[in-house]
Amino acid sequence: MKNFTCVQDIGDLDTALQEAFEIKKERFKYVETGRNKTLMMIFFNSSLRTRLSTQKAALNLGMNVIVLDINQGAWKLETERGVIMDGDKPEHLLEAIPVMGCYCDVIGVRSFARFEDRNYDYEEVILNQFIKYSGRPVFSMEAATRHPLQSFADLITIEEYKKTARPKVVMTWAPHPRALPQAVPNSFAEWMNAADYDFVITHPEGYELDSKFVGNARVEYDQMKAFEGADFVYAKNWAAYTGDNYGKILCTDRAWTVSDRQMAVTNNAYFMHCLPVRRNMIVTDEVIESPQSIVIPEAANREISATVVLKRLIESLG
Ligand code: CP
């Protein structure tokens, strides 16, 4: 695996899952794999889980780790080519990236959508510049359009908890006070389609995702209908994707907050969320604290997905 930015990069899902469960049983089995190899983690945006779980994954593999928060202590970076750099940004990403590549063997990048220009976000300009100019294998720690380490962890979690071969998985939009990117729902949809579960997406009208991510999912605008018989409920907010509404909040209806009312019509579904989650906006206290909430094991699996991905990237170094 040369880079890891989407579900296609992981290859056969069954093989990846087997590897994940093997590592989960024996986390330090491959502690020699990363000896004298250095991971550099570049954060353009904040993180708790991705930062800690990916660092832990690197330690599982015996790697050294360098973490850089671009907005805390680094030079402010210009990201656009052709700009006359007479403003407050003294360094260009096109020098900074190859310099970063000099000091490490693998690079992880977190760079969210900016919501200024949909094409810019969906072309993944920042992530692709790292791939092009760093000279190193690059993996996404959540980019503008996908969060594959999260989705891989979500898949591992569903495989651990599912009671039928092809569970019904419902991804539901839920309200949030700020406009959030589509990276998590896009990515979750991509991985659920690849896993071939019975996959349903529910959201208010106007929140349609890019059809390339929706794939074979059924879209149901009636949330209660979507929840009927669900085995897993995956809640997430996202801002509008379509047309001039890109990046806008179109609905604040708290009836979409996941509560006992919706969970009552499921097949005693497990509740999932990538975290951080705003309680009583996305999900009620009662649901997230219920025995059916698996948000903590889901977060714990971030260490496992990151260990598999880092191991494969190191192996690609030859
Ligand atoms: N789920 C997730 O990526 O969490 P962080 O934003 O805290 O890394």
Image (spheres, helix red, strand yellow):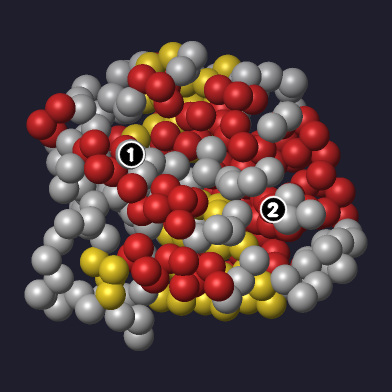
Q: Quadrant of residue 207?
A: top left
Q: Is residue 281 above or below residue 228?
A: below
- The spot of residue 21 in percent (x, y) is 82, 46
Badge 2 amino acid: Leu
Q: Is residue 158 left or right of residue 67?
A: right
Cα distance in 3D space between marks 2 and 1? 23 Å
Residue 240 shows up from this direction: yes
Question: Which x, y percent locates residue 122?
Answer: 32, 38
Work out whether residue 122 or residue 14 is closer to the camera in this orientation and state it: 122
Along the line of sight, which residue is nearer the eye, 168 or 67?
67
Judge the density around disc 1: few (<14), some (14-19), many (≥20) Cα neighbours within 10 Å: few
| Left or right: where 114 falls relative to 62 | left
* Residue 9 placement: quadrant: top right
- Under mark 1, the amino acid is Glu
* Residue for point 13% across, 33% down: 245
Q: Are marks 2 and 1 in contact (CB under 8 Å)?
A: no
| Relative to 172, 281 lies left or right | left
The correct choice, above or below, for 118 with respect to 36 in the image is above
> Where is residue 85 shown, x and y percent of the image?
15, 71
Determine which residue is flagged by label 1.
123
| Residue at the spot 49% in from the left edge and 14% down from the top edge | 216
How many marks can you see? 2
For residue 313, which numbered disc appears in the image? 2
Answer whether residue 168 is visible to the viewer in this image.
no
Q: Residue at x 17, y 57 (%)?
A: 82
Query: Element at badge 2?
Result: helix
